[in-house]
Image: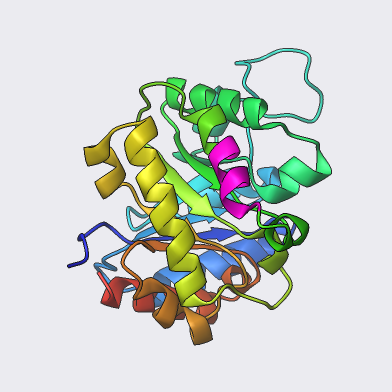
Amino acid sequence: MRMRRQPVVAGNWKMHKLRREAQEFCQELLANLDEEPQASIILYPSFPLLTDMAAALDDPRVSLGGQDLHPADSGAHTGDVSGPQLIDAGCSWVLCGHSERRADHAESDALVGRKAEAALQHGLTPMICVGETAAQREAGQTFKVLERQLSAVFSQEFGEFTLAYEPVWAIGSGLSATPELAQEVHAFLRQRLAELVDPEQANWVSILYGGSVKPENAAALIAQPDIDGFLIGGASLDPDKFLAIIRLAAAAA
């Protein structure tokens, strides 16, 4: 029997949308969102959009998150953003270790762990991203890579968090892991969290799938017992598609 974990549907806008486009999206989303959506909804826009988005999303049904943060509270770190700055801009969530940050900015597993700790210290809920590349999967290293990524973050007692599995080979490719393959990985992640953190916490933490999620494949994925929602890229830029996925996730709760 499936645990009744709260579904989480998050949209990562990456480096997309201008202020006007973001405001129009928020208006359409709120106008068509169910009064009680039965899912936690988060949007991760780029940093310049945060304050406008916070004003446009003055609604308890939708939370706002930053796409990254620096481990330090402040300092000489050009181009970075701190936890206190994200809080000040209206965020309650933050992505840590997204695969594009790991690849484009050479973020190590240890750095991702420090960022997650900093998020907790400032009252942000970290959404910690893990996943393997196509080469790693083809070499049979998926679980080894995930084990390494998890161990670097969850080496001690940990606060509230969400985990997102994003197979790097599926992001933006139009390809998606089959529901069965995704479930196998999610079950592994939950088992390792039980060993690294706490069995009870592992039972209740939401583990999201991210990798070319769209309305056409969301229902089959969310039906799996250890898939609790989605971290969505391209489909989250379209309010109709985003709303459709939210409703599919809520229906499976």
Q: Where residue 50 sits: x, y (%)?
A: 60, 45
Instruction: In the rendered view, tell whether residue 236 sits above or below residue 43.
Output: below
Q: Where residue 10 sits: x, y (%)?
A: 49, 59
Instruction: In the rendered view, tell whether residue 97 sits above or below residue 17.
Output: above
Instruction: In the rendered view, tell whether residue 172 sits above or below residue 92.
Output: below
Q: Is residue 25 left or right of residue 140?
A: left
Instruction: In the rendered view, tell whether residue 109 sits above or below residue 9.
Output: above
Which quadrant, please, contains the C terminus? Answer: bottom left
Q: Where residue 212 sits: x, y (%)?
A: 62, 72
Which quadrant, please, contains the N terminus? Answer: bottom left
Q: Residue at x 39, y 57 (%)?
A: 187
Q: Residue at x 52, y 31 (%)?
A: 151
Q: Where residue 127 sits: x, y (%)?
A: 49, 44
* Frontmost residue, 75 versus 136: 136
Does 142 appear in magenta? yes
Q: Residue furthest left?
A: 1
Q: Residue furthest bottom?
A: 216
Q: Residue 12 appears in which quarter of the rendering?
A: bottom right
* Frontmost residue, 81 versus 193: 193
Q: Residue at x 42, y 45 (%)?
A: 162
Q: Which residues are magenta?
A: 141-149
Q: Is residue 243 visible in the rendered structure shown here? A: no
